[in-house]
Image: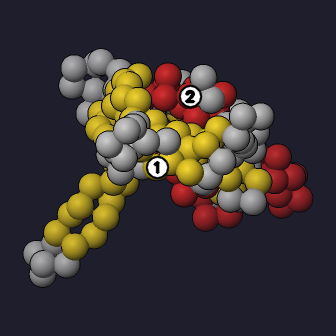
Amino acid sequence: MSNRRRTENFSVRFVEQRAEGWAFHVGDFFRMQLDIRLDQRMDVAANKKKKEQLGRPLSSSERVIRSVWTQGDPPAYSFDRGHIFHEVGTSNEGIRRSIVVLLGKPDPGALVERESTDESGSETTLVAETEAADGKEGFVDYEVLTYKNGVLVVNEDGNAIKEQSSRTQAGFVELLRTGR
């Protein structure tokens, strides 16, 4: 893992397993793609209190460690092919959208899953940071499907009308957050 800064203060708050206040339903299972992970950190206040109680410096095994959710600062996002998001609300005209990610390239340093096989042939999934080889920010190619009063909007041939677009990973997160 790199030494990228991570913060305990970030704007995403999950309530009932989804990002609160976002335009699209983003479940807490997308934490990794939002560069959020559970880290271990020293509990400075608890260690100070324990040191005062014992009247001596703490050994490494005596130190208090806490688990805390952190996010990269700035975040490195990693949305990819196959991710689907549905708009939370419906407009006054009965319009609701769904987004399907067609292709994505993670930001440098983003958290991604990697498949690994050991000598015995057992497969494991590991979470690792992407390489910053070219230093360019990632992108997301996606299509938007529109529903009116719960019915998919189609053309005269009966095929779904799909609006295709592309954004940076950060721009895509902004679309999920605001709907624009």
Colour scheme employed for the rendering of this structure: secondary structure
Q: Nearer the viewer, residue 114 or 20?
A: 20
Residue on which disc 2 sits: 175
Looking at the image, is 106 positioned above or below residue 151? above
Which residue is at 56% across, 44% downward? 147
Tell me the number on the disc at residue 33.
Answer: none
Q: Quadrant of the N terminus?
A: top left
Which residue is at 19% across, 78% downward? 122
Q: Nearer the viewer, residue 173 or 65?
A: 173
User: Within the image, what quadrant is residue 29 found in?
Assistant: bottom right
Q: Residue furthest bottom?
A: 120
Q: Residue furthest front?
A: 156
Is disc 1 surrounded by few (<14), some (14 to 19) or many (20+) residues within 10 Å?
some
- Please, what is the three-letter code of the amino acid marked with disc 2? Leu
- 3D distance between C-alphas at marks 2 and 1: 13 Å
Residue 110 appearing in the image: no
Q: Is residue 119 left or right of residue 49?
A: left
Looking at the image, is 31 positioned above or below residue 164? below
Disc 2 element = helix
User: Within the image, what quadrant is residue 161 found in?
Assistant: top left
Residue 121's spot in the image, x, y percent? 12, 78
Residue 54 appearing in the image: yes
Q: Is residue 105 left or right of residue 163?
A: left
Q: Is residue 102 left or right of residue 172?
A: left
- Please, what is the three-letter code of the amino acid marked with disc 1? Ile
Which residue is at 27% across, 55% downward? 114
Q: Earlier in the sequence, mark 2 or mark 1?
A: 1
Tell me the number on the disc at residue 84.
Answer: 1
